[in-house]
Amino acid sequence: MKDQLIIFDTTLRDGEQSPGASMTKDEKVRIAKSLERMRVDIIEAGFPIASIGDFESVQAVAKAVKDSRICGLARALDKDIDRAGEALKPANASRIHTFIATSPIHMQMKLRMQPDEVVENAVKAVKRARQYTDDVEFSPEDAGRSDLDFLCRVLEAVIDAGAKTLNIPDTVGYNLPHQFGELIKNLRESIPNSDKAIFSVHCHNDLGLAVANSLSAVMNGARQVECTINGLGERAGNASLEEVVMAVRTRQDMFDCDTRLDTTQILTASRLVSGITGFVVQPNKAIVGANAFAHESGIHQDGVLKNRETYEIMRAEDVGWNTNRMVLGKHSGRNAFRSRLKELGIELESEEDLNSAFTRFKELADKKHEVFDEDIQALVSDTLTEDNERIRLISMRVCSETGEIPVANVTLAVDDNEVKTEMKGSGPVDAAFKAIESMVQSHTELQLYSVSNITSGTDSQGEVSVRLEKGGRIVSGQGTDTDIVIASAKAYINALNKMLLPADRAHPQV
Ligand code: KIV
Ligand code: ZN
């Protein structure tokens, strides 16, 4: 029997810390449900003390998910731990993850604490967290640049205080694989009570080594990996869940452990996260990129047709490609639509949401003959977000003609008041954005605008991502439509709505 490698997903916490990736409560619940379907062991749902919204999101995930353990992050502070304990109350199984920095630079410059005080605070935090749950994880932040002897001292003390998981973060992505593996081995061998805890790793990707470092740690005895869908996360991101899981699964000859994940759910989760956050997956991204299983050159194709193993080390269907691309059309009824939603794991809370999504499905099926799973995912995202937004697109007309300046006429509902205007622009999208901005007066800067197609073919829906900045705050918005100018307007409005939400959230590591 091989050991179990525990998969701890932090898309909703560390993933959300990347600028512009913030998610609403409903979006977090949808992602959490998709992780639960994938049989992820632990879902870090957020940092409850950050804001009321973050607290409610962790609570909502704890209520909605029953088969994965739900974790909340807390600094080594009483108020953080109490808030996490409170938010996790509805969970079937909960964990509190508490942390304090242990590297010289973090202790001196950020915490302004002496090493003794850090040990004292770490022990106190673990003991307090144990009052809420017997599953407590402790992280010495910036372990990758901490002194080994000091790390051993802190970790021994927190195990005695009741920590069951010791998570070793390479917070700034500084380590190299052999070095990080060695660190895990040294810690396990040097800490006298190390057999009482599970060693976990949490690697950042600043040097592109997050997955390699995580795997090296696993080879040296780590039995939990912290990771995110699509490698989303602070700066260059975290170790990507799909890469870690598929490396371990594909190279079972090299690992004495395996995960219990249903890998066929990987692609759906990847698309959901990228659709919600607007962080587009690059085509050559391992496992989930559009080209990951595409064979362009004739020589490769020939080899794959004769025997797929000539150029394929994994089966595309094992990670969710080419499975069940069930098509619905304009004659598909409500029941077919409802059961497809169910198969995709989409749960709409009210009959009203279902009606609204079904109306959109019919509109889409009228324009586009075949409606794919990806279209349905996007359509549900649009329905759930747009119905609750303060600014809504009512109608739009754009004229674009060779030799003429494009003009957009846009009608919006802003807090239920109808406003309309006409603006010119260098192109139809520019005209539409100018018209919207002139009515909303957001004074935001457009940082990124990108269009991609959801499925193939010119009748595909366009998926637009927009990133806006104002006073250092970054938000992103998404919109889909078969008309890319309308998709662009929806994305812009979605980002503006996010900018209107309260921004007073604490960052756990600053
Ligand atoms: O990168 C890091 O150190 C973290 C900790 C909070 C675990 O995210
Ligand atoms: Zn991190």
Image: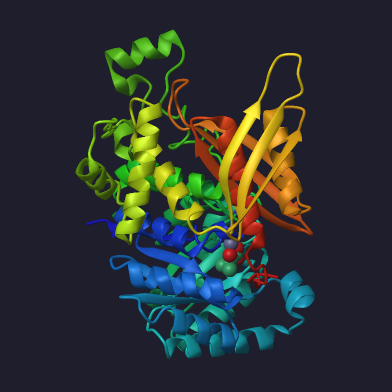
Q: Nearer the viewer, residue 94 or 244?
A: 94
Q: Nearer the viewer, residue 64 or 309?
A: 64
One can see residue 25 in this view: yes
Which one is in front, 97 or 153? 97
Residue 287: x percent and y percent?
43, 37
Q: Residue at x 24, y 35 (%)?
A: 332
Image quarter (top left, top right, bottom left or bottom right) of the C terminus: bottom right
Q: Residue at x 74, y 54 (%)?
A: 442
Q: Is residue 126 above or below residue 444?
A: below
- The quarter of the displayed image where residue 470 is located: bottom right
Q: Which part of the image, by quadrant, shows the N terminus?
A: bottom left
Left or right of 474? Residue 289 is left
Does residue 402 appear to the left or right of 212 in the view shown?
right
**Numbered circles on residues, count:** 0
Please provide percent x and percent y for residue 246.
Answer: 38, 43
Q: Relative to 369, is 270 above or below? A: below
> Ligand 1, what quadrant?
bottom right
Residue 256 showing in the rendered view? no
Estimate the x, y position of residue 452 in percent, counting from the top left. 54, 31
Residue 17 x/y as whole percent:
61, 60
